[in-house]
Amino acid sequence: MPRSRINGNFIDKTFSIVANILLQIIPTTSGEKEAFTYYRDGVIWMSAQSEGNYAEALQNYYEAMRLEIDPYDRSYILYNIGLIHTSNGEHTKALEYYFRALERNPFLPQAFNNMAVICHYVRGEQAIHQGDSEIAEAWFDQAAEYWKQAIALTPGNYIEAHNWLKITGRFE
């Protein structure tokens, strides 16, 4: 049963009600409505991360991808799939989905930020712990490039990343 029918959270219920009203009043095709329903259910499942319902959220997002044709909407579905893979520690898969989201919508600073975080805190730090400072520096350089793109899209955000770029001499 879709989460939108069984949720008990006030915010989830409110989101479901507003989404259902919008779905009824906005002129859309039946395919678009069905895609949105799966996307909405995926978002609601994302809010239940602490319950460990990632598999069901992924199922809803994959179904939404099958139905959704708008590249902009698809970018957010792909981004959310990336979030789930990040949460599951599947960083290679997460990077793949963030890349795919950015191919459809290059104005997703949060995708650039998440890619930078994976490159820096997962790959770079892992290389340091393995004693490979050269590989670590390459990952840190890649993280810097992603953070620069995120900051360029949303100046004033990602202050910690901005400071790291300055301190490490990677900000131009």
Image (spheres, rainbow, N blue to C red):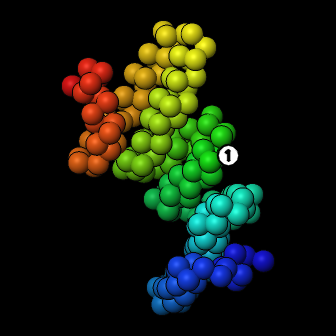
Q: Position of residue 56 (x, y in %)?
A: 74, 63
Q: Which residue is mark 1?
A: 88
Q: Position of residue 116 (x, y in %)?
A: 44, 35
Residue 63: tell me if it is visible: no
Query: In which quadrant will I find the N terminus?
Result: bottom right
Q: Residue at x 36, y 28 (%)?
A: 144
Query: In which quadrant will I find the C terminus?
Result: top left
Choose between 124 and 154: the one closer to the eye: 124
Report the amino acid beneath label 1. Answer: Asn
Numbered disc 1: secondary structure? loop
Q: Is residue 46 left or right of residue 157?
A: right
Q: From this view, report whether residue 132 is shown above or below residue 142.
A: above
- The quadrant holding residue 46 is bottom right
Q: From this view, report whether residue 42 is shown above or below residue 116.
A: below
Q: Is residue 57 left or right of residue 23?
A: right
Q: From this view, report whether residue 132 is shown above or below residue 103.
A: above
Q: Residue at x 67, y 46 (%)?
A: 88
Q: Position of residue 71 (x, y in %)?
A: 49, 57
Q: Is residue 146 left or right of residue 65?
A: left
- The quadrant holding residue 132 is top right
Residue 164: tell me if it is visible: yes
Q: How many marks?
A: 1
**Mark 1 neighbour density, 10 Å: few (under 14) some (14–19) many (20 or more):** few
Q: Position of residue 160 (x, y in %)?
A: 32, 39
Q: Residue at x 61, y 71 (%)?
A: 44
Choose between 107 and 83: the one closer to the eye: 83
